[in-house]
Amino acid sequence: QVQLVESGGGLVQAGGSLRLSCAASGSISSINHMGWYRQAPGSQRELVAAITSGGSTNYADPVKGRFTIARDNGKNTVYLQMNSLRPEDTAVYYCNAVAAKADRVWNDYWGQGTQVTVSS
């Protein structure tokens, strides 16, 4: 079993910052992509940022220049530094990892989600 545990969400005023963390644990052999998605009420889940095991990153246009994704491969942990937060960033943020166990079968894994609320 693979578990992703997120932390760092909360309530912040517009213009403020938050840092999300997500630690993967369990019977992990290897992790490829890790990323953050978000889902606002009434909206579909959308990609925020992703990072490969080699450190290549990809960002959604609305967060470019404000959010930074990073990972610590030794700790199987991915981070999302969110600066200059806006009310429209309010959503539940989910951690995602494409990981393989000893059977070397790649699967998608998701965290339970952490609420980020930005007040105006």
Image: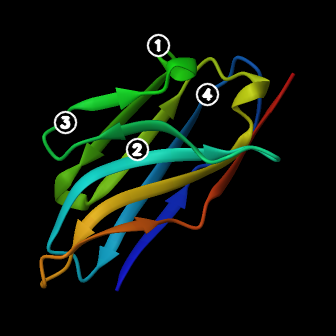
Residue under circle 3?
Answer: 55
Element class at badge 4: loop
Q: CA distance from mark 1 to mark 4?
A: 13 Å
Q: Which residue is mark 4?
A: 17
Amino acid type indicated by mark 1: Gly
Contact (Cβ within 8 Å) of mark 1 with mark 3: no
78 relative position to 81: left or right: left
Determine whether the residue tagged by mark 3 lies in a helix, strand or loop: loop
Rendered view: 101 above or below 109: below
Pointers 4 and 2 in contact (C-beta within 8 Å): no
Q: Residue furthest top?
A: 65
Q: Which residue is mark 2?
A: 79
- Characterize the local packing of mark 2: few (<14), some (14-19) or many (20 or more) Cα atoms within 10 angstroms: many
Q: Nearer the viewer, mark 3 or mark 2?
A: 3
SS class, disc 2: strand
Position of residue 21 measured from the top left corner of the image (x, y, whole percent): 46, 51
Q: In 3D space, how far apart are the residues under numbered discs 4 and 2 (Cα atoms)?
A: 13 Å
Given the current orientation, which residue lies at the most extreme right position?
A: 120
Disc 2 marks a residue whose amino acid type is: Tyr
Look at label 3 and name its amino acid.
Gly
Q: Quadrant of residue 77?
A: bottom left
The picture quadrant where one finds residue 85 is top right
Up the image or down, 25 lies above or below 64; here it is: below
Q: Residue at x 72, y 21 (%)?
A: 86
The tag earlier along the polypeptide, 3 or 4, is 4
Q: Earlier in the sequence, mark 1 or mark 2?
A: 1
The numbered dot on residue 65 is: 1
Q: Residue at x 24, y 49 (%)?
A: 72
Task: Give me the residue at 21% from left, 32% from top.
Answer: 56
- Tally of numbered tags: 4
